[in-house]
Image (cartoon, rainbow, N blue to C red):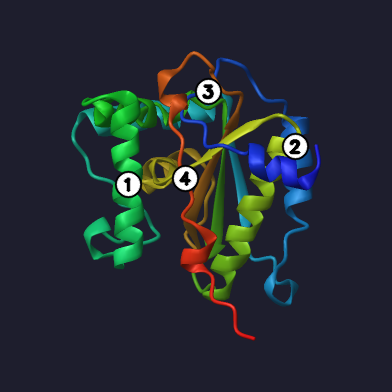
Amino acid sequence: METQNAILNRHSTRYFADKEVEISDIKKILEIAQKAPSWVNSQPEHIYLATGDSLEKIRQGYINKTNDGYHGNPELPVLSRKNWAKQGRTNMATWSQGVSNTLGSNWQDVMGNAAMKLYNAPAVIYLTLPKDYSLWSLYDLGAFGQTLMLAATDMEIDSMTAYQLIKYPDILRSSLPISNDEIIISGIALGYRDSAAYVNQITSKRQSLEKILTIAK
């Protein structure tokens, strides 16, 4: 698959089929992701792969905490939607309305149920940075994550990156050997899309280029 096709075909998968992803394929994806640009070649990230029993332990912990009404407490601070700039708030509101139109009035329950189960993903990659990371490293990690997902798409493996995957860091730390010198930044689920899952019909639109582009001549 050419690069352009990988970009255009990548789509957030909100429920995965009961099919494992080969570890060898995940390693290949990660090796490709390592080609992403890095500030002064610092390569600050560390990668934790959760699969098998480790991931099931995490998943059950998430289900229990969600059912008990615990709010998320990610290690990377989250800004309330109401505090985003106007452009961001407008785009998020439009997306939410589109989800409601697709899934119906109980869309939050439908999405919440999938998220609680970590989207039924057979593998989740967690990315960390050292506690004393430079803010430039956040760009590095974003580039790494995007390259990772494009490499997965090229291999016909689906992906999902979401707040849900890192909202309970205590569960992650109890299941994965993450040191206290690291901060959990993001999670990316890998697997194969369940085409029968209604939640996978959700799509999103990007705003027009003219709205965000300023050309200085």
Give, as a three-letter code, the residue at label 1. Answer: Thr
Q: Residues under labels 3 and 1: Cα distance?
A: 25 Å
Secondary structure at badge 1 equals helix
Mark closest to the chain's N terminus, 4 or 1: 1
Residue 145 visible from this viewpoint: yes
Residue identifier under label 4: 205
Mark closest to the chain's N terminus, 4 or 2: 2
Secondary structure at badge 3 equals loop
Mark closest to the chain's N terminus, 1 or 2: 1
Residue identifier under label 1: 94
Q: Is 123 left or right of 167, judged from the image as shown? A: right
Residue at image coords 78%, 32%: 24
Labelled disc at residue 154: 2
Q: Residues under labels 4 and 1: Cα distance?
A: 9 Å
Give, as a three-letter code, the residue at label 4. Answer: Lys
Mark closest to the chain's N terminus, 3 or 4: 3
In this picture, is 41 found above or below 62? below
Q: Nearer the viewer, residue 25 or 68?
A: 25
**Circle 1 residues within 10 Å: few <14, some 14–19, many ≥20:** some
Q: Are marks 4 and 1 in contact (CB under 8 Å)?
A: yes
Give, as a three-letter code, the residue at label 2. Answer: Asp
Labelled disc at residue 16: 3
Secondary structure at badge 2 equals helix
Residue at image coords 67%, 47%: 148
Which of the two marks, 1 or 2, is nearer to us in this view? 1
Q: Are marks 4 and 2 in contact (CB under 8 Å)?
A: no
> Residue 34: horizontal and vertical position, in percent?
75, 55
In this picture, is 36 found above or below 6? below
Q: Is 33 left or right of 164, judged from the image as shown? A: right
Which of the two marks, 3 or 1, is nearer to us in this view? 1
Mark closest to the chain's N terminus, 2 or 3: 3
Q: Nearer the viewer, residue 200 or 204?
A: 204
